[in-house]
Amino acid sequence: MSSLSPTPPTPPTHVPPGLRSEEFQRLALSLPEAEEQDHFGKPSFRVRGKIFATHWVAEERAVLKLSLEEQDSLVQAQPDVFSVTPWGHQGWTRVELRRVDRTLLEELLVGAWRRVAPKRVVAQWDAGRSGEPAAPPGSPSPPRRRRRAT
């Protein structure tokens, strides 16, 4: 037997910058039609009444509605940042704000918003970001083309 003990794992050289609670709130509210409402004593962020994120301010944590695939991948890859909530079977995933990479969080927050926002709102936002003119709010949707039976 060797008297040498195993070497401890090397800490990561890149520690992602933490995100302050105010920044999380600002990011969530920057999304179209996002509103903040109380949810059992915690701020929640909603689009037309549907929650896409909650904010546990004192714990410096957020809970986002992710796809089950995203949730599984993130929890396995970064268990110190992401964890499953009791509602995990619906995609609700806990995020440690001080440990998460800001760019990744922004991407996940937008994805959570997309899951609950009306398709028209998402399409208008996408069109605005791509430089295409967005249809004014309340304008009728373009007619759908029907496929001809062959």
Image: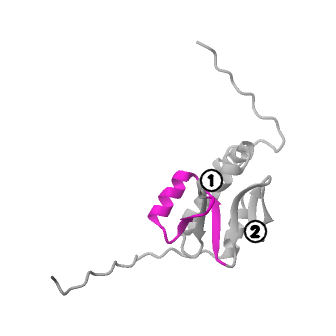
- Which residue is farthest top? 150
Q: Residues within 10 Å of mark 2 (few under 14, many from 20)?
A: some
Q: Position of residue 110 (x, y in %)?
A: 64, 56
Marks 2 and 1 in Cβ contact (< 8 Å):
no
Q: Please state which of residues 47 and 76 is positioned toward the viewer in this rendering.
A: 76
Q: Position of residue 41 (x, y in %)?
A: 78, 71
In the rendered image, the quadrant that contains the N terminus is bottom left
Please report whichever mark, 2 or 1, sits nearer to the chain's N-terminal start. Answer: 2
Question: Label 1's element?
Answer: helix
**Three-letter amino acid code at the position of disc 1:** Gln
Q: Position of residue 147 (x, y in %)?
A: 64, 20
- Answer with the quarter of the image where residue 87 lies: bottom right
Magenta stretch, residue numbers: 59-87
Q: Please state which of residues 24 and 129 is positioned toward the viewer in this rendering.
A: 24
How is this picture coloured? Answer: one colour
Identify residue for label 2.
43
Identify residue for label 1.
90
**Mark identifier at residue 102:** none
**Three-letter amino acid code at the position of disc 2:** Pro
What residue is drawn where x is 83% and y is 38%? 139
Q: Position of residue 49 (x, y in %)?
A: 79, 54
What residue is drawn where x is 68% and y is 21%? 146
- Which residue is farthest right? 138
Q: Please state which of residues 101 and 133 is positioned toward the viewer in this rendering.
A: 101
17 shown above or below 67: below
Question: Label 2's element?
Answer: strand
Q: Residues within 10 Å of mark 1 (few under 14, many from 20)?
A: few
Q: How many marks?
A: 2
What residue is drawn where x is 65% and y is 77%? 59
138 shown above or below 27: above
